[in-house]
Amino acid sequence: MRLTLKVWRQKNKSDKGGFETYQLNNVDTHASFLEMMDVLNEQLVNENKIPVAFDHDCREGICGACSMVINGRPHGPLKGTTTCQLHMRHFHDGETVTIEPFRANAFPVLKDLVVDRSSFERIQQAGGYISVGTGSAPEANNIPVNKVDAEKAFDSAACIGCGACVAACKNGSAMLFVGAKVSQYALLPQGHPERNERVLNMVAVMDEEGFGGCTNTGACEAECPKEISVANIMRLNREYISAKLSVEKE
Amino acid sequence: MSLTGLFLISFLLVHCSINALMFLNDDGLLFNEAAHFMASNILIRTVEIFLFLFLIIHILQSVAITRQNMKARTISYAGSSATATSKWYSRSMGILGALILVFLVIHLKDFFIPSRFTDRLGFDSNGTPDMYSEVKMAFENPAYAMIYILSMIVLAYHLLHGFQSAFRSLGIYHKKYTPVIEFLGTAFSIVVPAVFAAMPIFFLLKK
Ligand code: HEM
Ligand code: SF4
Ligand code: FES
């Protein structure tokens, strides 16, 4: 399969950057998108050019590193998959594929397709945890959790922190990510003691980092590789309003 | 944003119900009476102050939100496919809202101000201020009727997203009830602007 690639190249954070066009003449339809990028980079190295920088790690859809916007879609056109799980058979011979970094001011481009997502980590550090040592796995039925809540919490916890929701959102809003992180604890008894501080602190950092606000367009849910539901955003709103109304400052 | 939006929605329902009286075959007598009641009752006048206040808050919030969100992403994608994942009107609330504002200015200038602050209105056969004829006269002008109808289409799209979005912003989401809210929202967004838009059509056809 032959492909024309339009790839965003940017030397560093302050470089303006722009698109470069490359030809690949022999792309294997069984290759994953990242393997195709590897082939491109080999070709560039052979031509004595600088390879394209892109993030990747697990290559099996669990780490969330492989941030790329393919033909305008974070993680490409396939529903519920990461870039590393996307295969070249979903493209056709002779196609021009546009590859860009995630775009959001809270995710500055570091080089080519690599963006700085440490803003997500700072949100997590503000409350995305339970601050007691949990030790080894406790006896399963010590703390009763009903099945519906357990399943919802599990679905929220499936978020891999990839940032595609931010990349997809016209407002660069992180509310699907934060909603998932807040929900996974709000739904379980272990999360309840720190429930109010958690949501207030995480939202405060989210705003400080320059993410936009949610206007319910639903683009995040459509692009999320883990198909996290926008119900998590509504739960975030609910948790936030209830914390605002119940927490009293000393 | 959501609270002010929902208040404006409740206002639309009242406004629309009263306007529907124009379709009665009584040369607007009942409509004039209702309009006069709304313009003179002290309770309604008090709520009206809140209406303007909420409208202004809604606009200020919308400017703040739209500006903040535009700042959060200043570079857009070359290969854009936003249409695949969200509705155009959900992404265009700022523009739709601004168009509604333009309409509101025209609308207040032509109907609200004359009825409230001038003695331009005549009187109907019951001796009530004749708002009906004022409206009729305005809508017999096809250009004016056209602006009005187009504005109602804009309003419909603003509501189509806004109605259900307001509930989501308030954190209301439920597997069983959210589809009901969405259905009511869609019905409201079509029926209410359609009743408003039916007035110019009604007067144009009658002429
Ligand atoms: C009768 C008039 C109006 C009604 C019934 C109405 C209703 C609503 C509702 C229910 C929302 C959703 C709120 C939320 O999701 O939290 C909304 C959002 C919004 N409104 Fe209005 N509105 C009206 C007029 C206006 C005007 C005059 C403007 C601007 C000048 C405006 C600008 C906006 C904007 C920018 C949003 C956006 C939030 C988003 O992007 O989702 N609206 N409106
Ligand atoms: S919510 Fe989905 S898109 Fe957003 S960070 Fe989590 S897994 Fe990625
Ligand atoms: S490389 Fe880990 S999810 Fe794609």
Image: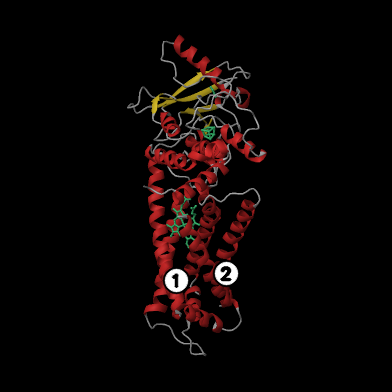
Task: Say what secondary structure mark 2 lies in.
Answer: helix
Q: Residues within 10 Å of mark 1 (few under 14, many from 20)?
A: few
Q: Are marks 2 and 1 in contact (CB under 8 Å)?
A: no
Q: Secondary structure at mark 1?
A: helix
Please tell me which of labels 2 and 1 falls first in the chain: 1
Mark 1 lies on residue: B47
* Whole-percent x, y for residue B12 in the image: 52, 66
Question: Which circle, 2 or 1, is nearer the viewer?
Answer: 1
| Of A70 and A189, the residue lying toward us | A189
Query: Which of these two is toward me, B13 or A23?
Result: B13
In the foreground, B13 or A98: B13
What percent of the width, then of the height, locates residue A70? 52, 29
Quadrant of the rendered image holding ligand 3: top right
Query: Is residue B140 positioned above or below B168 on the image?
Result: below
User: Amino acid under label 1?
Assistant: Val
Q: Which mark is residue B201?
A: none
Question: Is the CB of the residue bearing disc 1 within 8 angstroms of ligand 1?
Answer: no
Q: Amino acid at mark 2?
A: Ala
| Quadrant assignment, res A62 | top right
- The CA span between labels 2 and 1 is 27 Å
Horizontally, is A25 left or right of B77 in the view? right
Q: Position of residue B18 (x, y in %)?
A: 54, 74
According to the image, label 2 marks what residue? B198
State whether residue A222 is above or below residue A215: above
The answer for which chain carries disc 2 is B
Residue farthest toward the left in the current orientation of the protein: A14
Q: Is residue B207 left or right of residue B69?
A: right
Task: Answer yes or no: are tags 2 and 1 on the same subunit.
Answer: yes
- Whether residue A230 is visible, yes or no, is no
